[in-house]
Image (tube, rainbow, N blue to C red):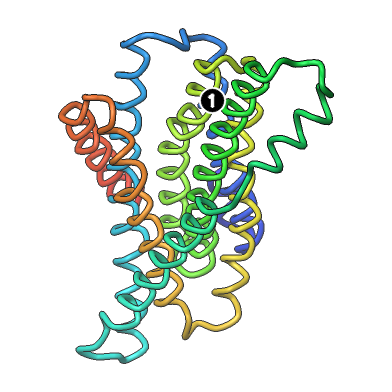
Amino acid sequence: MSSWLEQQNPYTQTLCGTLFTWGVTALGAAMIFVMPVRGKHTKTLLDCSLGFAAGIMLAASYWSLLAPAIEQAENQEFGSLSWLPVAVGIALGAGFVAAAGSYCANVDITSIVSDSYKKNDGDLENPKTREQKEASFRRMLAMVVAITVHNIPEGMAVGVGFGGTNFAQARNLALGIGLQNFPEGLAVSLPLAAAGESKWKAFFWGQLSGFVEPIFGMLGVMFVQISSVLLPYALGFAAGAMIYVVMDDIVPDACSRNNASLAAKFSIVGFIVMMAMDVALG
């Protein structure tokens, strides 16, 4: 499969890579069908998984994105300023995710929630039940939006990787993102199921959070195919976005349930796994 994919054009490679990462997201979300959705051990498992994902993403940001970005800048004869286009890309990537997250956090979803339940349930529910359902729906929507926004740079990173680096680096990046997408899918579906949503609905929203990756992967590869001059900026952008996601979302979430030390240990494991995989697979 790997040899066949290596012979394809960057667009086909990106499509296959991002479909893989989406599929792993769905696999993670599907774990709610075979594991308990409530209990202390479940939360511990989730935090360990998120810590592992953080380590994977940090290692992938360097070996599969930042190192090739600096190499590309050096090839374009930036000289001692080879760091500059990469730094600009990092700042733009982090700023993009921060702005998108801020916008989604400030969107008023009250009317959406109310209209949804009014349409489905009419006036038959008592106010207390309606309020509980609206609160549940609001939590669900906020969580799905947050994870979906953070999956955008991951999809772009795969596209930029296949469009701008060698095949081995891009393949390793897709594998690494796929590995860390597993706990991300679980991070959406597990809290929804624990809050009372049906397992099928929780699974649907969990896998849907990864749907943006093929879309933005194709946009990423299209972007770097336009001009090689933009490549250091694009690779830096993808790395900056991923690093910001780790620092702003994954790490705080993994440390929010009194398992910070355990999450940190698993982040080191994830970092080592990605580093070893990148070296061993070329």
Q: Would you say 244 lies left or right of 99 here?
A: left
Check disc 1: other Cα within 10 Å, few if <14, some if 14-19, many if 20+.
Answer: many
Q: Residue at x 51, y 48 (%)?
A: 151
Say if 225 sits above or below 131 in the image. below
Q: Position of residue 106 (x, y in %)?
A: 52, 54
Residue type at numbered disc 1: Ser
Q: Nearer the viewer, residue 274 or 148?
A: 148
At x 24%, y 37%, the residue is 267
Question: Residue 3 placed where, x, y %?
Answer: 55, 49
Say above or below: 152 vs 20: below
Q: Number of labelled discs?
A: 1
> Quadrant of the image for the N terminus?
top right
Q: Is residue 279 left or right of residue 164?
A: left
- Residue 74 at x, y = what percent? 30, 83
Q: How far from the left and from the top, in percent, is residue 35?
A: 47, 9
Q: Is residue 187 above or below residue 198?
A: below
Residue found 54% across the figure and 40% down from its top: 142
Q: Which residue is mark 1?
A: 189
Tell me which corner region of the image, top left, top right, bottom left or bottom right, holds residue 79. Answer: bottom left
Q: Secondary structure at mark 1?
A: helix
Q: Residue at x 37, y 14 (%)?
A: 42
